[in-house]
Amino acid sequence: LSLGAAAAAAGGGTGGLLGLVSPAEALPVSTSAKTRQLSPADMAAIVEQDLVDRQFLVTANFTQEIYDEGCTFTDEVDSYGFDEFVRGTSLLFDASKSHVDLVGEVQADDSQVTFRFSEELCFNIPLLKPKVYLTGKVVLKRGQDGLITSYQEFWDQPIPDVLKTTHF
């Protein structure tokens, strides 16, 4: 669940949500060197660590060296550029009250990395801190150089059903 879905859950546009937290609190976008041509096993291990240990779906704290700077991040609501995903996700969710679980194993080959997840997301809206629950699958497509060029979420529930899980 990214910027657009959270805005829908909160009943407004992303501008209002993002204005609730100072841009200085957003994670900086890495400009570090890229790690290309990783084996599928190495790529799967990094993505698993990013998801399980760093909770990257709610923190945007992930190994940016394996992502192309032009990577697009798409959920069931909208698509985001690299910088927008990193900054927006880190502002949008209260990571201390959100949690993501890996369901099964991370699968990887030379063309993609996939995993299933379940998550409870707490939106960073002062006083309210609404939470939603959803499950789904992420597909990370790899380019010829082995970097991730696209991120796409496929939710198991339609958006209205996700919104019905809202609780405080």
Image (tube, grey):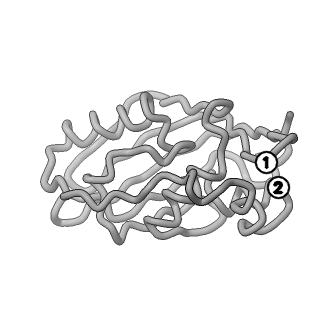
Q: How many neighbours does mark 2 have within 10 angstroms: few (below 14), some (14-19), or many (20 or more)?
A: some
**CB under 8 Å between discs 2 and 1:** yes
What percent of the width, then of the height, locates residue 47? 34, 40
Q: How many neighbours does mark 1 have within 10 angstroms: few (below 14), some (14-19), or many (20 or more)?
A: some
Could you tell me which secondary element the residue under label 1 belongs to? loop
Residue plotted at (53% across, 36% down)? 117
Q: Which residue is mark 2?
A: 10
The number of discs equals 2
Residue 61 drawn above or below residue 78: above
What percent of the width, then of the height, locates residue 120? 67, 34
* Residue 27 placement, left or right of 47: right
Residue plotted at (68% across, 54% down)? 21
Residue plotted at (85% across, 35% down)? 167
* Residue 19 placement, left or right of 87: right
Q: Amino acid at mark 1?
A: Ile
Q: Which residue is mark 1?
A: 125
